[in-house]
Image (cartoon, rainbow, N blue to C red):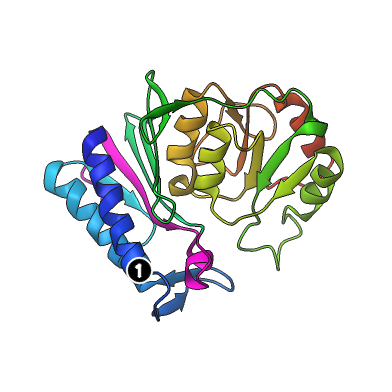
């Protein structure tokens, strides 16, 4: 299954790189939520690989409805995480594929095709970047930490928009980054490049693969309260574990999507 997931990610990434920097057909799913022909074509390429090997498995993907076949196996697919970046020619985007078995994510693949980085995690077998095992950072103080985050699509309408948390963490941490691809933020946290990450109002295809990567790299992932993380939930807090509680304390100062 890992080999097929990697193959599917490579196929999706190939489509994205072929179209990157070219004129795209761009539509809007909301005020700031874009979808391009690259999203759709990459998803079709990924699903073709998965369905070609596992025709009875369910698929939950961002751009199309593939129905429900009642399988215990469900592939969770984001063909292009970072669509806005991609549409503007900013090279920070990824393919994210996870496998959920009876409600538990047991395989995660995040592929950054522009930089040739393939992140892979299997339940109980560690997290890897291009076949080299990775681990979360050892930074022990929030004030020394580099953090990542993102802002929800309804940020212009909803007061629960993460702006307050961003300001608070800019004061508490060494620095914060907002690059625009949740899956890569989680992968980079797993690889020790970020010390922590928080975001709200995400979808399962944004976080399913990254969740497993962080866990298998020795990190912690939860909701803002510190309760077990749910890929179908509204809050995501990931860290190296050492700064998890201090991050929770900062989050208590702002608004939550409840």
Figure quadrant of residue 97: top left
Q: Is residue 34 left or right of residue 38?
A: right
Q: Is residue 176 left or right of residue 50?
A: right
Say which quadrant the C terminus sits in: top right
Q: Which residues are magenta?
A: 67-91
Say which quadrant the N terminus sits in: top left
Provide residue 81's location: percent of width, then percent of height: 46, 56
Provide residue 135's location: percent of width, then percent of height: 53, 25
From where the camera sits, is residue 154 visible? yes
Q: Nearer the viewer, residue 236 or 83?
A: 83
Q: Is residue 34 left or right of residue 131?
A: right
Residue at (27, 41) in percent of width and height: 5
Secondary structure of the residue carrying numbered label 1: helix
Number of callouts? 1
From where the camera sits, is residue 71 visible? no
For disc 1, the marked residue is 38
Residue at (82, 33) in percent of width and height: 143
Q: Nearer the viewer, residue 130 or 163?
A: 130
Provide residue 164's location: percent of width, then percent of height: 81, 51
């Amino acid at each position: 299954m890992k080999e097929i997931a990697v193959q599917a990610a490579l196929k999706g990434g190939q489509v994205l790189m072929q179209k990157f920097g070219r004129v795209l057909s761009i539509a809007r799913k909301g005020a700031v939520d874009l979808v391009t022909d690259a999203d759709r074509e990459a998803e079709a390429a990924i699903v073709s690989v998965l369905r070609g090997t596992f025709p009875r498995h369910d698929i939950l993907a961002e751009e199309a409805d593939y129905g429900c076949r009642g399988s215990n196996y469900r592939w969770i697919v984001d063909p292009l995480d970072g669509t806005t970046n991609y549409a503007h020619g900013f090279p920070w985007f990824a393919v994210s594929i996870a496998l959920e078995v009876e409600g538990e994510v047991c395989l995660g693949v995040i592929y950054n095709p522009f930089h040739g980085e393939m992140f892979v995690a299997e339940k109980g077998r560690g997290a890897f970047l291009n076949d080299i095992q990775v681990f979360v950072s050892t930074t022990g103080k929030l004030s020394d930490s580099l953090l990542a985050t993102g802002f929800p699509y309804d940020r212009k309408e909803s007061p629960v928009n993460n702006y307050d948390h961003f300001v608070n963490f800019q004061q508490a941490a060494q620095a914060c980054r907002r690059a625009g691809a949740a899956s890569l933020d989680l992968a980079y946290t797993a690889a020790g490049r970020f010390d922590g990450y928080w975001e709200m109002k995400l979808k399962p295809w944004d976080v399913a693969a990254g969740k497993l990567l962080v866990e298998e790299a020795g990190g912690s992932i939860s909701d803002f309260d510190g309760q077990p993380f749910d890929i179908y939930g509204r809050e995501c807090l990931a860290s190296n574990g050492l700064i998890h509680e201090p991050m929770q304390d900062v989050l208590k100062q702002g608004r939550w999507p409840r």
